[in-house]
Image (tube, rainbow, N blue to C red):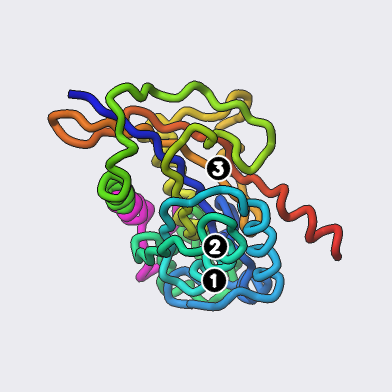
C-alpha cells in the first residue's frame, strides 16, 4: 500500500539572534539596538516590525493556510497574528504555539550586544555561528528540536487532512517560479505557515538541505540558501509525504524559494 500527500510549508523567521540567518519576523527594539534576544529576552515588535508584518500579510493575503505553527515568543506570535489578520482565507485558522520553534538559546549572551557574542567566539577561536555561550544551546540541540517539530508537523498534517492522501498522487514536478506569492503551491492541497526565529531557522534549513537532501531551486547557489535575510523574509518548502506499511515517510522535500523580500519594497517607497 502506498498513498501520498503534498504539503507546502511557508516559513517566516525572526533574525533576532546572531547576524546571519533566514527570515526576520518583524523588527524589535533589540534588533534595532543590535542586542541578542534568544529565548530569555521576550520583546514585542517595534513600530517598524508591525509595518513589516503588515506588508508580509498583504503579500500572502490570497494564500489559504490550512495550518499555522508559531514560536510561543511574543515577537513571533504578533507577527503571525498580523499575517493572519490580513489573510482572506485563513483569519480563523488556529494558531498552534509550539516551544519547539523558539529561538536558539544564547545563555549568558542574551540581552547583550551581538558584538559581545562575536568577541567571545573569537576568544574561543570559533566562528560566531558555531560558538555556544555558557548556558546556551549547541547547534546539535537546536537541530534536535527541529527534528522533533517536523514529527509534530507531519503528525498534524495526517490527522487534520486525511482526505488529502491519495493512492494516485505522484511527486510534484519542479514548480515554475514567477515571483508570485503562490509560486509552487497551486496544486498543493495542504499549506502550513510556520513562524520562528533566525538562528533556529538557519540550523533547520541546513538540516533540510544537507541532511535530508532537500532539492533546491535551479540556479541558486548553496551559499545563497544560508545567507542573511531581512525581517519577514519568506521561504517555501514542499514536502511529499507517503504512508507505507512501515509508517509515514517523507519521499521528497523541495525548496521553492528562500529569503523572498519583495513585500518590503512598499515600505521603502513610503519612507
Indicate the secondary structure of the residue bearing disc 3. Answer: loop
The residue sitting at the left extreme is: 245
Q: Which span of residues is magenta-colored?
A: 130-148
- First in sequence: mark 2 vs mark 3: 2
Q: Are marks 3 and 1 in contact (CB under 8 Å)?
A: no
| Residue appearing at x 49%, y 74% in the figure | 74
Q: Are marks 2 and 1 in contact (CB under 8 Å)?
A: no
Q: Is residue 118 visible?
A: no
Q: Is 146 covered by the magenta stretch?
A: yes
| Residue appearing at x 38%, y 63% in the figure | 96
| Residue appearing at x 55%, y 45% in the figure | 235
Q: Is residue 106 above or below residue 247?
A: below
Q: Which residue is mark 3?
A: 226
Q: Which residue is mark 1?
A: 78
The x and y percentages for residue 122 are: 53, 58
Indicate the secondary structure of the residue bearing disc 1. Answer: helix
Which tag is nearer the camera, tag 2 or tag 1? Answer: 2
Q: Circle 1: is it few (<14), some (14-19), or many (20+) Cα within 10 Å?
A: many
Amino acid at each position: 500500500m502506498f498513498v501520498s500527500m503534498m504539503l507546502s510549508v511557508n516559513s517566516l523567521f525572526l533574525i533576532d539572534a546572531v547576524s546571519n540567518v533566514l527570515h526576520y519576523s518583524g523588527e524589535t527594539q533589540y534588533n534595532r539596538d543590535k542586542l541578542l534576544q534568544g529565548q530569555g529576552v521576550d520583546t514585542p515588535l517595534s513600530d517598524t516590525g508591525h509595518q513589516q508584518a503588515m506588508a508580509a500579510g498583504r503579500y500572502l493575503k490570497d494564500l489559504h493556510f490550512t495550518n499555522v505553527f508559531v514560536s510561543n515568543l511574543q515577537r513571533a506570535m504578533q507577527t503571525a497574528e498580523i499575517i493572519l489578520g490580513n489573510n482572506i482565507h485563513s483569519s480563523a485558522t488556529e494558531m498552534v504555539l509550539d516551544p519547539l520553534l523558539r529561538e536558539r538559546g544564547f545563555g549568558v549572551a542574551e540581552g547583550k550586544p551581538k558584538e559581545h557574542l562575536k568577541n567571545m567566539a573569537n576568544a574561543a577561536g570559533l566562528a560566531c555561528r558555531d560558538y555556544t555561550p555558557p548556558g546556551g544551546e549547541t547547534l546539535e540541540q537546536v537541530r534536535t528540536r527541529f527534528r522533533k517539530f517536523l514529527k509534530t508537523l507531519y503528525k498534524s498534517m495526517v490527522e487534520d487532512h486525511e482526505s488529502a492522501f491519495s493512492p494516485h498522487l505522484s511527486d510534484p514536478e519542479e514548480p515554475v517560479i514567477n515571483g508570485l506569492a503562490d509560486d509552487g503551491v497551486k496544486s498543493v492541497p495542504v499549506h502550513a505557515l510556520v513562524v520562528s526565529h533566525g538562528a533556529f531557522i538557519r540550523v533547520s534549513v541546513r538540516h533540510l538541505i544537507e541532511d535530508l537532501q532537500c532539492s533546491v531551486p535551479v540556479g541558486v547557489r548553496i551559499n545563497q540558501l544560508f545567507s542573511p535575510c531581512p525581517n519577514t523574509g519568506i521561504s517555501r518548502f514542499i514536502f511529499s509525504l507517503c504512508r507505507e506499511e512501515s509508517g509515514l515517510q517523507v519521499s521528497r522535500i523541495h525548496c521553492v524559494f528562500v529569503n523572498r523580500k519583495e513585500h518590503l519594497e512598499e515600505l521603502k517607497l513610503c519612507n
